[in-house]
Image (cartoon, rainbow, N blue to C red):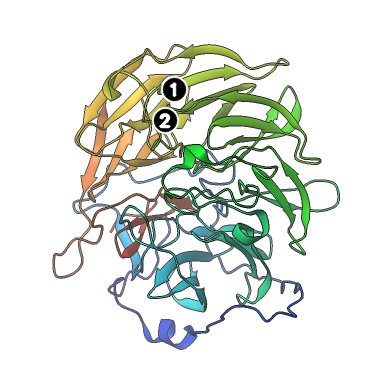
Amino acid sequence: MFRWWTNRDPTRPTAAVTAVATALSLLAPPADFAPRAAEPVADLATRPGEDWGAFLGPTSNGRSAVQGIVSPWPAGGARIVWQCELGEGYVPPAVERGRALVFDRVGDEYRLRCLHAETGAILWERRSPADYTDLFGYDGGPRSAPVIAGDRVVTFDPEGRLECRSVADGALSWSVDTTAEYGVVRNFFGVGAAPLVVDVAGGPIVIAPVGGSPPGSAPAAPERLDLVRGLDSGLVAFDLASGRERWRASSELAGYSSPVAARIGGVDRVVAWLRDRLVVVDPGSGAVRNGFRWRAEDLFSVVAANPVVQGDEVLLTEAYGPGSVLLDLAGDEPRVLRQDPRRARPATALKVHWATPVLHDGHLYAASGRHAGDAALVCVDWRTGAVRWAEEGFGRASLAFADGHLVVVAEFGDLLLVRATPERFTPVSRARLVDPSGGPLLEPPCWAAPVVARGLCYVRGAGRLVCIDLLEER
């Protein structure tokens, strides 16, 4: 067993934390800015295990390889290691080599902080101007999780600014205003899909759902996105080192689902569910190899959960209408293996709003439902779509898989440990994390996916990030 900082109150900074903390700020780059090489990054981690530098983990599926977690938790929940205040936003951190990259908004600035992953100490901080206002009244913070790729970290803010910085000190390597460069007509909730970094011939690339349009495409009524047409930049690949464009693909507009790397038919592919349509792309060239339309006809519908890939099969799920569909992508055209019945209720289908389902032993685990009141935590058979069990009361929860269990962050702040078994809903532990005064640490909305890295789990609520230890009791 590991033991970390047990002689102190983990909710208070130590002198050592204060000593290493620095506050740096960086505004927009000058006009003559040139791409900057990233500094080498030392490994600060003292715990063994797997990092989660990409959205939903190293394989983009919310599954951790950790073994030996504490089950059940002691009274009061898993041990709190540290916690920190956050500004606006809804995204989880990226964690790699002992660092947690945390992206939020404070006032009129986006803020990227690098924290020591095991203590919460601030290692550096960088800021950039923020001018986003949500059309529907949600907060103006980031919707797209940061992604760590080697010595660099990539962020995608709600206004469409794609930036690459050094993990070592936060210095800006390059920046692309995708909204201006590609004529993007603003989506309902700004930019929200996480970039994907993959290695290809010629060096790693950053693949971002951009969804640009021809000049003059913005409708008079900003919500009438059904009148907007795409051009040629549904997906755009940028060179990780320089930020220059490597390829662009598809005339689809962008949605909120993040692209996923996959092996389809034994060949490397990128699977991206854009505004209306799934596209399967060659990551080296950007050539579109396949496609399938799946979206509700409702004007205000969005797709946000990532595609779930198993072999040559891909599952898509949304909450506004048709629910889920399972596709076989091995052939020249997608083949529908099954789909949810029309007008199925969330508890009898898989109708996920945004939190990508977790696949384990032939079953999907997810929160099914468009609204907090109708959502249910469900277990669904991958092959048949049959709902094995459904349990209400957790809202639109987010999940991660760890050592035969589901770590569940309920929408209103409860944290659960549930056995990942199709036989029945089997909760092991349930806790409401509190500060020393007894106040809740996770307040709604809790919409960020949990992150599990080297046995530590990072969970986010409104205005706060909390790190708990899955491997050690209090």
Residue 312, visible in the rendered structure: yes
Coordinates of residue 29 in the picture (x, y in percent): 65, 78
Relative to residue 464, is residue 290 drawn left or right?
Answer: right
Coordinates of residue 438 in the picture (x, y in percent): 13, 65
The secondary structure type at the circle numbered 1 is strand
Q: Is 157 rendered above or below residue 207? A: below
Residue 423, visible in the rendered structure: no
In contact (CB < 8 Å): disc 1 and disc 2:
yes
Q: Nearer the viewer, residue 206 or 299?
A: 299
Coordinates of residue 46 in the picture (x, y in percent): 54, 65
Quadrant position of residue 245 = bottom right
Mark seen at residue 158: none
Residue located at (63% from left, 74% from top):
168
- Between marks 1 and 2, how big is the CA–CA gap? 6 Å
Quadrant position of residue 28 = bottom right
Coordinates of residue 425 in the picture (x, y in percent): 26, 26
**Amino acid tagged 1:** Ser
**How busy is the neighbourhood of tag 2: few (under 14 within 10 Å), some, or many (20 plus)?**
many
> What residue sits right under mark 2 in the picture?
318
**Residue occupying the far right of the picture:** 202
Q: Is 92 rendered above or below residue 409? A: below
Q: Is 209 rendered above or below residue 129? A: above
Q: Earlier in the sequence, mark 1 or mark 2?
A: 2
The secondary structure type at the circle numbered 2 is loop
Q: Quadrant of the C terminus?
A: bottom left
Q: Quadrant of the N terminus?
A: bottom left
Mark seen at residue 324: 1
